[in-house]
Image: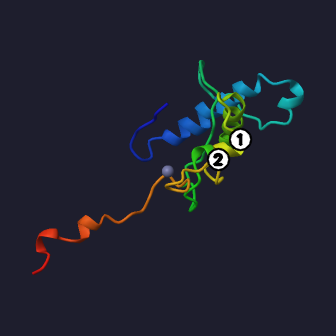
Amino acid sequence: MVFTGVSGSGKSSIVFDTIAAESQRQMNETYSAWIRGRLPKYEKPNVELIDNLNPSVIIDQSRLGGNSRSTVGTISDMYSALRLLFSRIGTPSIGPASYFSFNNPNGMCKTCAGIGKVMDIDISKLIHEDKKGR
Ligand SMILES: [Zn+2]
């Protein structure tokens, strides 16, 4: 789902206060009364109807922080569930859930050490081959 608009037009309000809150409220209704009593309470939004919502994962708008290993998956903790899922259903099996972690030596890319990018110097951009020997 994508929301666009000029600054101050209410994008965050409709996303966080109405749609995400209603999604959480509808999902919480599927749990037993015992569990619902322990979940955050969401008021029904003041609209006629919102339906066909998918379960939402609410991630605030602040930057992910200085850690370049932080991703939507790690801060929402979905990453742990996905690692477990891949380790259990992957065929052929490559090993335990830690093998799917870019923070674990067994799971990380050997080239970038799990960062996802590589800093390197292109020598050809520094040396003008045509000006050699002058
Ligand atoms: Zn890599």
> The residue under label 2 is which amino acid type?
Ser
On the image, the x and y values in percent for residue 111 come to 49, 55
Please identify the quarter of the rendering in which residue 21 is found. Answer: top right
Tell me the residue at 38%/43% (across/down): 6
Residue bearing the label numbered 2: 101
Local secondary structure at mark 1:
helix
Q: Which mark is residue 47?
A: none
Which kind of residue does numbered mark 1 sit on? Ala
26 horizontally vs 130: left or right: right
Coloring applied to the structure = rainbow
The answer to whether mark 2 and mark 1 are in CB contact below 8 A is yes
* In the image, the residue with mark 1 has its CB under 8 Å from the nearest atom of ligand 1: no
User: Residue 14, percent across and down?
Assistant: 54, 35
Mark 2: C-beta under 8 Å from nearest atom of ligand 1: no
**Mark 2 and mark 1: span between their CA atoms?**
7 Å
Q: Mark 2: give few (<14), some (14-19) or many (20+) Cα within 10 Å.
A: some
Q: Write the residue at 55% across / 49% down.
A: 61
Residue 18 percent coordinates (x, y): 60, 33
Q: Which residue is mark 1?
A: 97
Q: Quadrant of residue 119?
A: bottom left
Up-down relation of residue 26 to residue 58 (above or below): above
As drawn, the residue found furthest toward the front would be: 133
Q: Residue furthest bottom?
A: 134
18 or 94: nearer the viewer: 94
Residue at horizontal 62%, vertical 40%?
58
Residue 33 screen position, x and y as percent: 87, 25
Q: Is residue 66 left or right of residue 37?
A: left
Q: Quadrant of the C terminus?
A: bottom left
Q: Along the line of sight, which residue is nearer the eye, 119 or 63?
A: 119
User: Where 10 sits versus 33, above or below?
Assistant: below
**Of the pair 10 and 33, the residue shown nearer to us:** 33
